[in-house]
Image: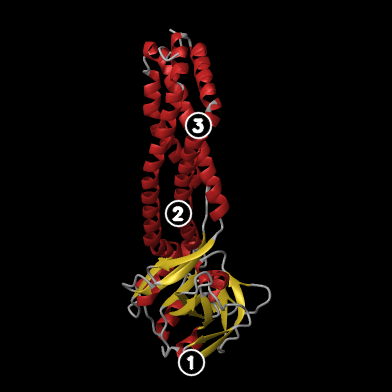
Amino acid sequence: MAGPINWCSQVVSVAKFGLLGIPQRRGSVAAAVFGIAGVVGVLVSVLSMAVGFQKTMSASAAPDSAIILRSGADSEMVSGFGKEETRLIADAPGLARDTNGALASAELFVIINLPKRSTGMDANVPFRGVEMAAFGVRNIRIMEGGRSLNWGQNEVIVGVGAAQEFAGLAVGKTLHIGRSEWPIVGLFSAGGGTAESEIWTDATVLQGAYHRGTGYQSVYARLSSPAAFTQFKDSLTTDPRLSVKVMRQAEFYAEQSTQVTRLITVLGVLIAALMAVGAVFGALNTMYNSVSTRTREIATLRALGFGRLAILTAVMFEALALALIGGLVGGMVAYVAFNGFHTSTVNWQSFSQVTFAFHVTPLLLGLGIALATVIGFFGGLLPAVRAARLPITAALREL
């Protein structure tokens, strides 16, 4: 029986001959490599969409932030508070405070239609009325070339994501919504969070424009520390004057993102799985072609004492090497084409657009390479078994 060193040299010799013969089989090899690259590229790019959406939602939630909705509400659209209720919330213990008072912003949330830059088709864009405390709650930064709101006036500031995705949202432009005109006085960033998908104005002005009286839909708050959440929540939920649902913003945005990320992930995996079946057959065709063109060579090697296991291992090595190349190509294409690519999708909880960027992570690239390896394994297994079982005498007759 051949020793380990002799077996390794046999594997290297057979694999070397197979790899050197690739130029003669370049058509089928290219089809297999690019087929695998396509599978990996689709999987990584689609899943990077889900990761990017999740990242945007999680970036919206600091550990010391909370959101208060009406009890039983699962989104701002179905929540509601009166002015007195928002005052009671702002007086609760556990809130952070600055020179202007508690960092609690009672907010109004409505939907407007604006055309997308890419398609020109209308989409739902969040139009949010906020109080001054909102800037401290979310750490908003006004971008250079604009300014913040003048409170009490029909002015708006626009999130950088919304300005990038939707037409007509540049500083100096005017939004025409219903019978009202809203000059755009600034752009703002919010650390990559969902607020960057929104348009903001003074909540009091928005109440008047939409005939909402003194009603609000939610309160966003910053706590004195993450540990103060329990005290803050208990003080509100035990107050008989209030009927509220208090959540950490991280928990709220995780719930908001679950449906979209699950849908994207399932579709991405399903599409990649269907493509992977085709890629496996492509790899099978390539490796069977490799074995059939090397029948006499393999038979000669077997006659010279090369073992079946060495032949099988060498053919599998060739299949996995081609799959790995395809996986690397697909991963690189997905990274170059989609990492950081900005788009928007519907948040099914609020039926409004959320802008975000695709995010190709090392984990996704590793997943793509793993999928390519699996395709290469199943695409090379049967041809490798066939090569190892070639009858020596029958093959030598062809010499």
Q: Sequence-wise, which precedes: disc 2 or disc 1?
A: 2
Q: Nearer the viewer, residue 174 or 97?
A: 174
Q: Position of residue 238 (x, y in %)?
A: 34, 72
> Cα distance, mark 3 to mark 1?
69 Å
Residue at horizontal 38%, vertical 60%?
258
Indicate whether 55 appears above or below 311.
below
Are the residues flagged by discs 2 and 1 in contact, CB closer than 8 Å? Answer: no
Q: Residues within 10 Å of mark 2 (few under 14, many from 20)?
A: many
Q: Sequence-wise, which precedes: disc 2 or disc 3?
A: 3
Q: Amino acid at mark 2?
A: Val
Indicate whether 3 appears above or below 324.
above
* Residue placed under numbered mark 1 in the picture: 179
Residue at horizontal 36%, vertical 61%?
259
Q: Sequence-wise, which precedes: disc 3 or disc 1?
A: 3
Task: Please tell me whether mark 3 sits on a helix, a strand or a loop.
Answer: helix
Q: Is residue 41 visible?
A: yes
Q: In the image, which disc is placed on residue 25?
A: 3
